[in-house]
Image (cartoon, rainbow, N blue to C red):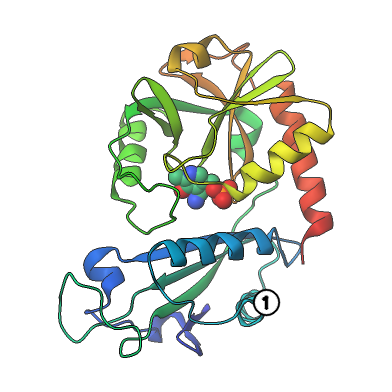
Amino acid sequence: MNTVYVNGEYVPQSDARVSVYDRGFLMADGVYEVTSVLDGKLVDFDGHVKRLWRSLSELDMAAPVTEDELLEIHRRLVELNNIEEGGVYLQVTRGAAPERDFAFPNPDEVPSTLVLFTFAKNLVGSPAADKGIKVISIEDIRWGRRDIKTVQLLYPSMGKMLAKKAGADDAWMVEDGFVTEGTSNNAYIVKGNKIITRGLSNDILHGITRAAVLRFAQEAQMEVEERNFTIEEAQQADEAFITSATTFVQPVVAIDEAQIGDGVPGKVARRLREIYIEESRKAAI
Ligand code: PMP
């Protein structure tokens, strides 16, 4: 059985316990990170920890452990659960206050909750990457601080369900006529040698994979343009793709049933996926 980490202890998954008063459970008052694992090593751990510290600080939540301790916990879980390929999920919540109250509890009295678990998953060999995915567009009705990686994931879950119902794989969210991001990934289009993706702001999550992929693209002499784009522009693009820690670079071959390019994964997305996997393997710790 999998071992999970809960507040300082490594326990079998079925014995892991969090209070019903935990604010993560009652109020989605928590943040998370997902770090992928390749060859038993952590991909871009540094980037994920930096974003975690930022999410915590934006919500006035204390960091429960140090960066070194976090690394140690990640590594120990990966080892205990024999994860060669997959990921580590981490969640920090504002802890369990003695009663349900909207006001934040005093952090000196109520320690935050820290939970980590691992999952095994084929990340490199992925049918979705070979075939490409289909997305639909939906209105983005999420809150205004999407740059904070909170566990309020109900609308993204609804988006996935809407996509499934429509026979697609995922949804791209649209606000004021422009694509913000996918339900759990950043969104891109390609026109010629140019990669176009929305710029960073509070409107989207600052993807760790996004930062790496844009850097690799520039190093490979591709042009990167950070700007808004519409669904119509995306439908006319040569290629489209998404990025996230667990999907890496995944080609998008249809948007709202309009085929993108030739309707098969494009060469820019395929190349970026290769580079990303190669470089991530090299730099994983
Ligand atoms: N946007 C959203 C809304 C996400 O949930 C995610 C993945 N958690 C991403 C983008 C991609 O971020 P990353 O590359 O750090 O996984």
Report whether residue 1 is seen.
Answer: no
At mark 1, the secondary structure is helix
Q: Is residue 79 above or below residue 187?
A: below
**Number of numbered discs present?**
1
Indicate the amino acid at tag 1. Answer: Arg
Considering depth in this image, is 12 or 20 the residue closer to the camera?
20
Residue 14: x, y in percent?
A: 40, 82
User: Residue 142 sits in which quadrant?
Assistant: top left
Quadrant the C terminus occupies: bottom right
Q: Is residue 226 above or below residue 31?
A: above
Mark 1 highlights which residue?
75
Q: Is residue 18 above or below residue 251?
A: below
86 sits left or right of 20 in the view = right
User: Residue 163 sits in which quadrant?
Assistant: top left
Q: Residue at x 32, y 81 (%)?
A: 18
Residue 35: x, y in percent?
A: 60, 61
Residue 268: x, y in percent?
A: 73, 24
Q: Residue at x 34, y 83 (%)?
A: 107
Q: Residue at x 43, y 72 (%)?
A: 92
Report whether residue 212 is seen.
Answer: yes
Residue 71: x, y in percent?
A: 66, 76
Considering depth in this image, is 105 or 89 the residue closer to the camera?
105
Q: Is residue 60 above or below residue 130?
A: below
Count neighbours of disc 1 (C-alpha within 10 A) and say few if under 14, some if 14 to 19, many if 20 or more. Answer: some
Q: Residue at x 60, y 77 (%)?
A: 70
Label 1 CB-ligand 1 distance < 8 A: no
